[in-house]
Image (tube, rainbow, N blue to C red):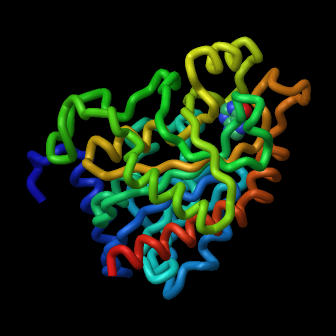
């Protein structure tokens, strides 16, 4: 390995080498499984599971409800790589650590990655349990994973974000939901830093500026993947009305519970998506 390569590329190479010792699968789809999607692992055939702790530079999540393993296998005939659990900036991680996993998916060969998360519903029509496709985002987290010297072998200094959530991939996600008979809204995701939930005034602001969903993840992964030329799709599970939309106080255990209840519907969308992508690529 040349010492002139930026550190991040060398770290990615180390991580990929460990994964390649256990599996040579090249994913057609990468998936980041957020809250409520833990059960996806049971559907993956011929799965190789690698705990994050075994992969250099990968951190295990500290949040309840987030596992920490990479799964490689086949879902409905499609080769997939799944990050089961993610780390968040609010846990105190550097931005480069927050996006390390998705960069690794890109280096494993994934041409597209589906990001999933639990989010608050900013619009009153997004009630708990709803699924919403992310069509764009507003990054109010105060962070961007590309700040610092640009690792130019990953991508350009100033990546275009005008199709941050790829419209064609998004269309495939919506068609999969329709075929699966699962209602799927579309909306803009606003990212806040957390870990405190938002105030009602912040949520009113988000509504005014055009957000439908609010959360604490996803946007950094989306930026890092676009930087590397990977197509991104996103689906939020609405786990709660955002602050002030209802009078109920927000509680993480309820957020996790609703996300788990909605998990099977999200899984059925993802299975159908995988099947349709496998058919299209056959
Ligand atoms: N706000 C921010 N992040 C979240 C929320 C919320 O209401 N629900 C789930 N993640």
Q: Quadrant of the C terminus?
A: bottom left
Q: What residue is shown at x 31% (from left), y 58% (from top)?
A: 106
Q: Inspect this view and state whether residue 140 appears.
A: yes
Number of marks present in the image shown: 0
Q: Is residue 135 above or below residue 198?
A: below
Outermost bottom residue: 46
- Quarter the N terminus occupies: bottom left
Q: Is residue 275 above or below residue 210?
A: below
Residue at 41% in and 71% down: 277
Residue 42 x %, y %:
64, 78
Residue 6, quarter of the rendered image: top left
The picture places residue 117, in percent across and down from the top left corner, at 61, 48
Q: Residue furthest right?
A: 247
Residue at image position (58%, 41%) is 186
Q: Which residue is nearer to you in this view: 86 or 132?
A: 132
Q: Is residue 282 left or right of residue 55?
A: left
Q: Quadrant of ligand 1?
A: top right
Q: Give coordinates of residue 222: x percent, y percent.
A: 41, 42
Q: Quadrant of residue 188?
A: top right
Q: Residue at x 25, y 61 (%)?
A: 13
Q: Is residue 113 left or right of residue 141?
A: left
Left or right of 76? Residue 3 is: left
Q: Is residue 48 visible?
A: no
Q: Give the image location of residue 274, x and y in percent.
A: 48, 71
Q: Is residue 267 above or below residue 44?
A: above
């Amino acid at each position: 390995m040349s010492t002139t390569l930026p550190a991040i590329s060398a770290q990615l190479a180390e991580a990929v080498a460990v994964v390649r010792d256990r599996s040579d699968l090249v994913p057609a789809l990468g998936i980041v499984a957020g809250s409520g999607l833990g059960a996806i692992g049971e559907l993956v055939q011929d799965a190789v599971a690698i705990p994050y702790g075994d992969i250099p530079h990968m951190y295990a999540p500290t949040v309840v409800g987030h596992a920490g393993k990479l799964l490689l296998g086949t879902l409905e005939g499609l080769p997939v790589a799944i990050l089961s659990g993610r780390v968040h900036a609010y846990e105190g991680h550097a931005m480069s650590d927050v996006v390390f996993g998705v960069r690794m998916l890109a280096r494993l060969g994934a041409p597209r990655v589906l990001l999933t998360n639990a989010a608050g519903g900013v619009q009153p029509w997004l009630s708990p349990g709803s699924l919403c496709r992310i069509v764009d985002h507003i990054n109010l987290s105060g962070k961007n994973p590309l700040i610092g010297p640009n690792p130019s072998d990953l991508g350009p200094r100033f990546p275009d974000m005008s199709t941050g959530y790829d419209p064609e991939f998004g269309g495939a996600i919506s068609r999969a939901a329709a075929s699966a008979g699962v209602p799927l809204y579309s909306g803009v995701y606003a990212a806040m830093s957390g870990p405190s939930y938002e105030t009602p005034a912040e949520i009113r602001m988000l509504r005014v500026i055009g957000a439908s969903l609010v959360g604490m993840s996803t946007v950094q992964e989306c930026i890092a993947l676009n930087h590397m030329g990977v197509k991104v799709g996103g689906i939020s599970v609405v786990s709660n009305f955002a602050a002030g939309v209802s009078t109920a106080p927000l509680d993480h255990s309820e957020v996790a519970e609703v996300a788990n209840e909605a998990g099977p519907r999200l899984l059925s969308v993802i299975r159908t998506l995988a099947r349709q992508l496998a058919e299209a690529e056959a």
